[in-house]
Image (cartoon, rainbow, N blue to C red):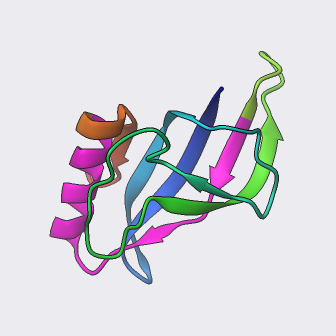
Amino acid sequence: MRIDIDFSIFDSPVSAYGNATGDIEVKTLPTVGDVVDLFEGRKAFELEGFTGKLKVTSVDQVETSGKAIFALEDVVVSSRSVAAELAGRLETELGLFCIDYDQ
């Protein structure tokens, strides 16, 4: 089954690079506190500070559609260039949509 996800990407503990959103495949519907694997059924890529396994922090219902959006924990990497690489790979390899807050 596919779920809609949303999480922030930080290029330092106090500096937000942007946001990632889209849908991913999961075996079972997660609840708050569960860990989802963004690479479920796919080959994982390695990148400093990112494992692809993120904890669900909240589940919110969209009033207009009734669909659920699963908010995931923030990802913190060491630099803006690593954050940009992560965003690019999330888009090309996982089909997510990433927003760079500075653009």
Locate the N terminus and report the quarter of the image it occupies.
top right
Which residue is the extreme one toward the top? Answer: 65
Residue 73 included in the magenta stretch of the image = yes
| Residue 12 in sight | yes
Q: Residue at x 82, y 51 (%)?
A: 31
- The x, y position of residue 2, in whole percent, is 61, 27
Which residue is more in the foreground, 56 or 25? 25
Quarter of the view holding residue 78? bottom left
Which residue is more in the foreground, 76 or 32? 32
What span is in magenta?
69-91
66 is higher (above) or lower (below) than 55: above
Which residue is more in the foreground, 42 or 47? 42
| Residue 103 in sight | no
- The x, y position of residue 18, in whole percent, is 39, 55
Quarter of the view holding residue 65? top right
- The x, y position of residue 55, in whole percent, is 65, 63
Residue 66 included in the magenta stretch of the image = no
